[in-house]
Amino acid sequence: MKNLLLTLLLLAAVSCAENQEPKENSVYYWKTVYKNDSTENDFLTRHQIKKIYMRYFDVIVDKKTQKPKPNATITFKDHPKEDIEIIPTVFITENCIQKNLDTLYKTLADRIFQINKTHKIPQAKEIQIDCDFTAKSMKKYYSFLSLLQNYLKEKDVKLSVTIRLHQLSMEVPPCDYGVLMLYNTGNYRDKKCDNPILGFKDVQPYLKHLKKYRLKMRSALPNFKWQILFGKNGFKNIVYNQNLKDSTLFQKTGEGVFRVVRSKDIPVYINTEAFNVMMNISDTVYEKKADFKEIEKVMTEISKIKKEILTNTIIYDLNSNNINNLTFKEYEKIFNFDDGGAAF
Amino acid sequence: MKRFLILMTAVLLSNFVKADVSCWYYPTYNYYLFKILDTQTEDEDFLEYWKNYAGGKTPVYSYDFSYGIDAILSDIENGSSSKAVIDAAIQKKDTEMLDYLKDLSTYLNVNQDFYNQWEYPDENQIKEYREVYEKLLEKAKKYSGQRLKDRYNLMAMRCMFQLEKYPEVEKFWLSDGIKTQDEYCKKQMTGLFAGALYHQKKINAAVNIFLQINDIQSVKFCLDDKRNLDGIRERYDKDKNDGALVFLVQDFVNMFQENIDSEDNGRPFDFRNIDYADAQDFITFANQIADKKASKTPVMWKTAAAMLSYYLNDIANAKKYAEQTANLDGTQRMKDVARVVRFFLSTKGEKYSSSKAAYYLSECLWLDKMAETDGFFENAKSRIVYQNLLPQNQNTNFYTLLASTDYTTINILKLNAAELESYLNYITQTKKLDNFEKYLLTKSHVKRDDVVEKLGTRYLGEMNFIKAEDYLSQVPVSYYKESPLRPYMVFRDYTQQRWNVTQDWIDDWGYDDESELEENQKIKFCKEIKTLTEVFERSTGDKRYSAAMKLATYLTQASRWGNCWYLLEYSWGVYEPRSKAQQTYEEKALAYFDEAVKSSDDKTKYEALYGKTWLLWHDYNYYYYDYSVHRDEQTVTPQMEKSMSDLKNYWDGVYGVGGWTISCDCVMDYVRTH
């Protein structure tokens, strides 16, 4: 009898454990070239990251044909480390959703499979789709996702999708799980916005929808920074990698605030379009970084509502330029915020 | 009005245009001093060959070839090509060249955007592309002519590289490539050769070649995992004189400088963090090598130890190690860098005295000579001057003299009259100057006339009109000929009422009017103010008030908000604070307005009330444009309140309540609503 009880208990424990996915630390890789980088590899090792959500390509509308087409496909300069699972991720612009998507699910999935095949990357166990859809495009997008999910199921491949905070008030998408994007939450066009990357006060209004949102989820948290250029008439653009310590160009006027003291024409990239923007004398560049205090606050509040979505958190993004924006301990706190829970 | 003021921000005037620009920004001057790799390169102009071929008529742009074979073929077929090279080849009926251009186009076309089609290439397609490379390679190798030999050889090596035939690249280089005459082709081929070595894991050989062709990015790539103390130790243990150590040691020192300098901002994209403990360990390691003379380049190790000690703020040891570099062996470049570092560290924390003149002079002359062919030495000199000599000698005439040798830091505009007078004495009593000071004087961009003119202007600002006139009279009118002040002096009139008359905008950067300046307006201004002041002081009644009105008008014009602000200052911008002289003039103008208001003449009274309000309004409104102080936080002073109330009452009396209008809608709006 005693042995039987023990056996039953053991079986119950095993069954429980089977329902829980193992804890996985993961990151997004959003660059257009995959190359082994010692800083990034070191980061992966130190934080025991075994999963990379890697942007494979974007889908945009071709100007000439007005049809969806792949763009900015990743180039593999190196072979990804073999002990790391790659989850191909595709960003689809919202205007693509307005086009005929009847066959897109297949061409898109097949393209991913072909990329993996060509580059001898183990076949994907999961694919992720990222799209900033709105109520207007939701129906058509979900129908695309549904077709894609069915197609992937045949091949035993999971489908995950990104969920932006404003999308929490909509129906849940057809997918295996969602990733709640906890970044780009504020209005970067508003210079008064303390932290457009992640601010609790920007997240809070959406949390009421979270409890009712019936979808398995993970969360994605930021480690990046932005340099935002404002002119006399307000927001001008996001600029990248400007050396704000260059006193021939900038004068620091406050914490994270730099006045432009010499005009400079700088290239700016918006989706596929590249154009130049002029930084004029007396314009201001605000540097906004992912702030761990805000991250912690957001995590704490979310944990009160749905702590399981913090079990397997994804850091956006793996980039040697951004890694040092948070400390080792801060990353560990993010990855191990909720040791007790399980996402699935 | 607001927009106008902001547009005015860039108005900068003086004989030292560059000097004034510097009030907007200051360079950091933190150039790398430890630059033992001479990376100066003269980039071969790869278009030169094509320009020559096309008869030099039309520049050829690189994208001519990036359109691919279709574009080039269609151009050839319809014969209406705008592309100079193809035109020239067709015209010359140069089939050999046309053939090569087609091949080149094919090569460039193969790798066009096929990775961004829905049909992602499979291995077979990639194989097809490889076949194209194979065919081109075969053709390139078979080329038997001489004229395009270098170009076909380059194509052959490129195709081999694309095909990842790295041993073949190496072999081809050694048999054929090495004989290449064309510099551009040779450099490209050398890079491919080094790349092929890298891919065959012959990292050391690859690094050495990349170093030879100054391809530091590739060196970094090859040594990516060695850019740290362990990497240096490892390389050193294998070979004490490994060529890669020159890069690794330089990189180690400079990355530590980046670590100290910029925290997390402004670092190079390939920044590598070197922490303090490693820097400290490196010093011990480097000193051991240098002291034992264990390598052929002890000077490199000792100089590195000196620089790192400096960054660790261990100045005494930094100086000691730098001194020890004097007789150590190394390449000439390393010895030159050591000499630079010795000079830099010897000036650290030292106030200038004539006992140092001989050493400073010899080192500066040497740096000047070296800088003629290598910008590193100019940068090094700047760092010595800006990080050590200037900050350590502030508020001295030596500082002013030293600063005057560089357009970007001329500071005589910041000096008051007493300081300028002292400086004038300093530079004119040349017998008292030591040799280094005399050397600096020859390099100075500030001449005696510049100092005298500024001195006169400063006295003008202090309302010491006698001394002002005395100094300004020593400067010939021709002095202003090349000055940006000239058009202002020609076209602006300080006798006009600022609040009633709009004077022309003068674009001092592009002004091309050549009108002669007949007299120095500053002197004229001095004289008229003196005369009017005498009238004002000696007269009574309306004559006194009339003089007061003129004085108020002139002083307002010379103040911060006047059209003739250039009488007292050399630049104008909304971000520039009001100078002491401008404040003095404003206060005095307000006092004269108060006198003029007493006039029994309605016109004078009206002008005085309006002028005063206008001046006060501008001063108040100025803060609105100073983004650090918001208008809402400004309090209307009792003086302004009274001025507005007086003006409003006066107008209401003349025109009836609210029935008046004035030329300045801003003031009108303000008076009506307050």
Image (cartoon, rainbow, N blue to C red):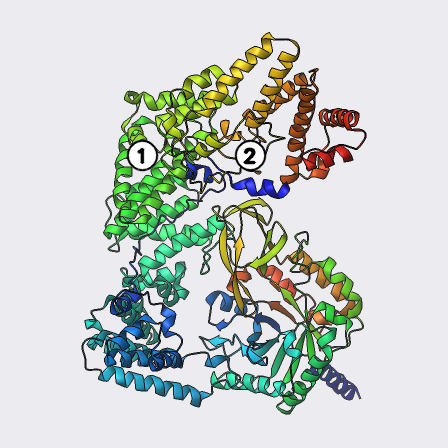
Along the horizontal axis of the image, is A58 left or right of B257? right
Along the horizontal axis of the image, is B40 left or right of A326? left
Q: Quadrant of the N terminus of chain A?
A: bottom right
Which residue bears the numbered disc 1?
A: B443
Of residue A186 and residue B626, the one placed in the foreground of this image is B626
Of residue A215 and residue B157, the one placed in the foreground of this image is B157
Of residue B65 and residue B306, the one placed in the foreground of this image is B65
Q: Is residue B249 visible?
A: yes
Establish if B324 lies above or below B238.
Answer: above
Q: Is residue B628 visible?
A: no
Instruction: Please report, as a chain letter, where disc 2 is located.
Output: B
What is the three-letter code of the residue carrying label 1?
Lys
Query: Residue at 26% of width from left, 78% of height from top?
Result: B97
Query: Residue at 74% of width from left, 87% of height from top?
Result: A7
Residue B275 in the image: x percent, y percent? 47, 54
Point out the tag, 2 or 1, that comes first from the N-terminus: 1
Q: Secondary structure at mark 2?
A: loop
Which residue bears the numbered disc 2?
A: B503
Image quarter of residue B580? top right
Instruction: Please report, as a chain letter, where disc 1 is located.
Output: B
